[in-house]
């Protein structure tokens, strides 16, 4: 389900009454609404993308390090054909049987990647804070939403709670915000 599949009335029912009947992906829809309308200036989407990318990187590198470590412990040498797989992350491993420091190299990669664990945790915390701040649960939030609908109506936007879909409303909100900013500067 996307924003264009639900009306303003259904959105309000989910948002304020917590009645998600027929709406399986509410969190995704709400995030999309915030991002599309421009109401979340920071936006959750870039955070989701950054967290996903860091998570994929860390899973890939951790898997690689575990594999190479196990192979090394079994046969006292790395799996040479797969050594280059980690190069895409900016790490270079070498193998010299005369100067065996391969486990030290693996440990160095692990230490360098810990900063990415810290960064991912920081981004997850930031995302959680944004989501908590955006979760309306008061009567005043309902009132603010209705006031916003009325303001858009006064500005000439035609909004029918049972006819206007949330993608349309999100774009109206964004356009109105851009118009207000332009008026401030002009």
Image (tube, grey):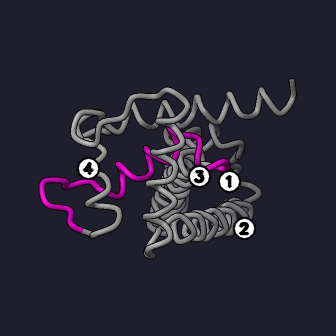
Residue that lies at the very extreme toward the front in this rendered image: 154
Q: Position of residue 3 (x, y in %)?
A: 32, 39
* Displayed quadrant of residue 65: bottom right
Kindly check if marks 4 and 3 are in contact, taking CB atoms under 8 A apart as contact.
no
Instruction: Identify the mark nearer the N-term, 4 or 3.
Output: 4
SS assignment at label 1: loop
> In the visual, does 156 lie left or right of 100?
left
Name the mark nearer the viewer: 4 or 2.
4
Q: Are marks 3 and 2 in contact (CB under 8 Å)?
A: no
- Give the Cα distance between marks 3 and 2: 24 Å
Q: Position of residue 156 (x, y in %)?
A: 50, 26
Q: Earlier in the sequence, mark 2 or mark 1?
A: 1
Indicate the secondary structure of the residue bearing disc 3. helix
The disc label shown at residue 111, or none: 2
Which one is in front in this view, the residue at disc 3 or the one at disc 1?
3
Q: Which mark is residue 97?
A: 1
Q: Label 1: few (<14), some or many (≥20) within 10 Å?
A: few
> In this rendering, is residue 154 above or below 68?
above
Q: Nearer the viewer, mark 4 or mark 3?
A: 4
Is 106 placed left or right of 58 in the picture?
A: right
Q: Earlier in the sequence, mark 3 or mark 1?
A: 3
Q: Nearer the viewer, residue 37 or 54?
A: 37
């Amino acid at each position: 389900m996307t924003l264009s599949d639900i009306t303003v009335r259904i959105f309000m029912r989910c948002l304020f009454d917590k009645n998600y009947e027929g709406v399986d992906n509410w969190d995704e829809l709400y995030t999309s609404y915030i991002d599309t309308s421009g109401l979340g200036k920071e936006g959750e989407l870039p955070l989701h993308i950054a967290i996903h990318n860091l998570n994929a990187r860390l899973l890939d590198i951790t898997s690689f390090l575990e594999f190479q470590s196990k192979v090394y412990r079994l046969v006292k040498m790395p799996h040479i054909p797969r050594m280059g797989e980690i190069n895409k992350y900016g790490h270079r491993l070498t193998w010299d049987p005369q100067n065996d420091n391969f486990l030290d190299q693996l440990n160095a990669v692990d230490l360098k990647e810990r900063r990415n664990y810290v960064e991912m945790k920081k981004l997850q915390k930031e995302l959680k804070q944004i989501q908590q701040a955006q979760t309306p649960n008061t009567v005043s939030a309902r009132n603010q939403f209705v006031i916003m609908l009325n303001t858009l109506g006064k500005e000439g936007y035609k909004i029918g709670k049972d006819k206007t879909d949330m993608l349309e409303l999100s774009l109206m909100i964004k356009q109105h915000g851009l118009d207000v900013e332009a008026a401030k500067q002009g």
